[in-house]
Image: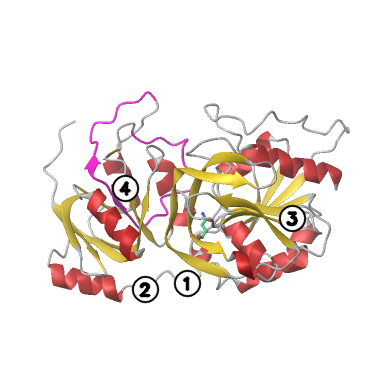
Amino acid sequence: MPHSSPKPAKLALADGTVFTGEHFGAIGEAFGEAVFNTSLTGYQEILTDPSYAGQIVTMTYPEIGNYGVNADDVESKGIAARGFVVRELCRRPSNFRSEKGLNEYLAEAGVVGISGVDTRALVRKLRSAGAMTAVISSETLDDDALVEKACNSPELVGQDLIRTVMPESAASWDEPLHKFAAPSAAPPSPNDGTPGRTPHVVAIDYGMKWNIPRHLSAMGCKVTVLPGTATAAEVQALKPDGVFLSNGPGDPRPLDYAVGTIRELLNDDVPIFGICLGQQLLGLACGGEIEKLKFGHRGANQPVLEKATGRVEITSQNHGFALKEATLPADVEVTHVNLNDDTVSGIRHKTRPAFAVQYHPEASAGPHDSGHLFARFREMMSKA
Ligand SMILES: NC(=O)CC[C@H](N)C(=O)O
């Protein structure tokens, strides 16, 4: 398909670095925290992962867009990332599932992209200086003005971003796992062998990736989704067999209301399973503290050790904050460790049926090594 010649665009970082490239997607300006993802594939799942709200995402893989985008591989109702940075944009995608190209996809969603950036140099900068605010612009091309804009844009720290991505009201989940998705594990019989028993999971949605409820459904659970502002009473009124705490964007520390809800739910004997932001909020509810990582973990090959078994899983991750191990109370056990930097990758409450991981067992995109955790949650519900 012929296309008009791309217009120039710039990416400026708050430390004064400016990259010149070509615009794609929507015309305009995008502000956010500059972060990078090392996955080779999965750009559509990354763009639509609500945990990227407030962030400009750079892909380290050099060619992006080659298999196009489709309506099935979304992780939420639209693109959540504020901006997208690539080395080379493929403008002629080729795949039997492709419905359109990335350029058109971003343009339709009003999201600004920049290609032709030396992403290796950018990532080296972010690794040594840490994640920082940035702007992509296809309108202002003056370096000093752009750097000033990057410096003046709000930092991610301290913002409540879950309200920008969570659902407005409760809903029941009815979308199955896609036919191309690998099942999380051999699903147990949908009703535990007990006629009529289908575990009811209430998923508290702080910006949940949709492959999570797809997996829960595939495990034979009935799933009701509540907004991240749900109170404990609203959760309890649904008489759940298990409560799921979702992933979500931004800094967990301002989310007092979510932490308060979880603290109350911990007093019930209902099994709780958290993923990513869900782990951070569970840790806060137990009395732990959060730290911001220098540049975070975003990619599909993060090695995680399960301490009890010595088993290592390769995991999909996307986070910039983590629980501080030394602050966790005695009744919280660190079950998993990230082998790249020894940060907390999984926790378990010693006396309550609650556990969580900092990584993404639902993959999408990424390896399926930890998909068995959905079965573990289901097992806990059948015992409760
Ligand atoms: N994927 C997530 O849930 C991310 C959690 C949190 N926003 C972080 O960046 O650490």
Identify residue type, mark 3. Ala
Q: Callout 4: helix, strand or loop?
A: helix
The residue that disc 3 covers is 354
The one of 215 and 336 positioned closer to us in this rendering: 336
| Mark carried by residue 106 | 4
Rate crowding at label 2 as few (under 14), some (14 to 19) or many (20 or more) other CA atoms within 10 Å. Answer: some
The residue that disc 1 covers is 159
Left or right of 95? Residue 346 is right
Residue at mark 1 to residue at mark 3: CA–CA distance: 27 Å
Residue at mark 2 to residue at mark 3: CA–CA distance: 35 Å
Name the spot of residue 135 as percent of width and height, x first: 26, 64
Q: Callout 1: helix, strand or loop?
A: loop
- Which callout, 4 or 3, points to the residue nearer the camera? 3
Q: How many marks?
A: 4
Rate crowding at label 4 as few (under 14), some (14 to 19) or many (20 or more) other CA atoms within 10 Å. Answer: many
* Mark closest to the chain's N terminus, 1 or 4: 4
Identify residue type, mark 2. Pro
**Which picture quadrant has residue 71?**
top left
- Circles 1 and 3: CB atoms closer than 8 Å: no
Q: Residue furthest top?
A: 96
Question: Start and end of the magenta stretch?
Answer: 68-96
Task: Name the residue at 21% across, 70% down.
Answer: 147
The residue that disc 2 covers is 154
- Circles 1 and 2: CB atoms closer than 8 Å: yes
Name the spot of residue 37 as percent of width and height, x first: 38, 49
Task: Name the residue at 73% across, 68% down.
Answer: 263
Left or right of 308? Residue 212 is left
Q: Callout 2: helix, strand or loop?
A: loop
The one of 277 and 201 positioned closer to us in this rendering: 277
